[in-house]
Amino acid sequence: MMLPEHKDRINLHNEQKSKQTKPELTEEEQQELYGRLRSSMLHTLRASIIVFKEYGNRQINGVVDWINPRTHLIKVDIGADWELIDFKDVLRVELDAPGY
């Protein structure tokens, strides 16, 4: 039988093992990501955005609604809702091809 304290300690240890460090992007890579986000906003293209999280990256799919250059926040329309993303956490942006 395992005590709750032991179980909590094991879970914490497992989480810390899976903790990842954020990759550093070059200035060129950041500019390319910004350009794709801007294209999504200007042309209302759906984008798949990979956002860094310490315990596993997250994918957000939607259309960029606005980009605030002062705060570096990005608002993404994800259908009936929206989400704010900090640009420093964006790792990858893929644009969906426009439908004809």
Image: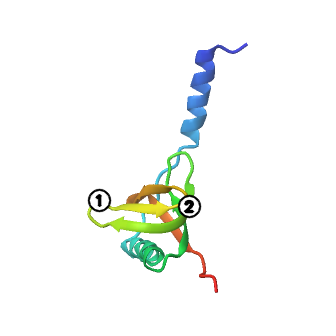
Quarter of the image for the N terminus: give it: top right
Name the residue located 58 percent from the left edge and 43 percent from the top edge: 18
- As measured in the structure, the alpha-carbon distance from the residue carrying label 2 to the one carrying label 1 is 24 Å
**Type of residue at label 2?**
Gly
Front one among 26 and 89 = 89
Q: Is residue 90 above or below residue 8?
A: below
Q: Is residue 84 above or below residue 5?
A: below
Quarter of the image for the C terminus: give it: bottom right
Secondary structure beneath dot 1 equals loop
Residue 87: quarter of image: bottom left
For label 2, the crowd category at 10 Å Cα-Cα, with few meaning under 14, some 14 to 19 and many 20 or more, is few
Return the mark for residue 79.
2
Horizontal side of residue 90 vs 95, given as left or right: left
Front one among 88 and 71 = 71
Residue 5: quarter of image: top right
Name the residue located 39 percent from the left edge and 59 percent from the top edge: 88
Which one is closest to the eye, mark 2 or mark 1?
Answer: 2
Return the residue at label 1: 71
Return the mark for residue 60.
none
**Type of residue at label 1?**
Thr
Secondary structure beneath dot 2 equals loop
Q: Position of residue 33 (x, y in %)?
A: 44, 72
Front one among 70 and 18 = 70
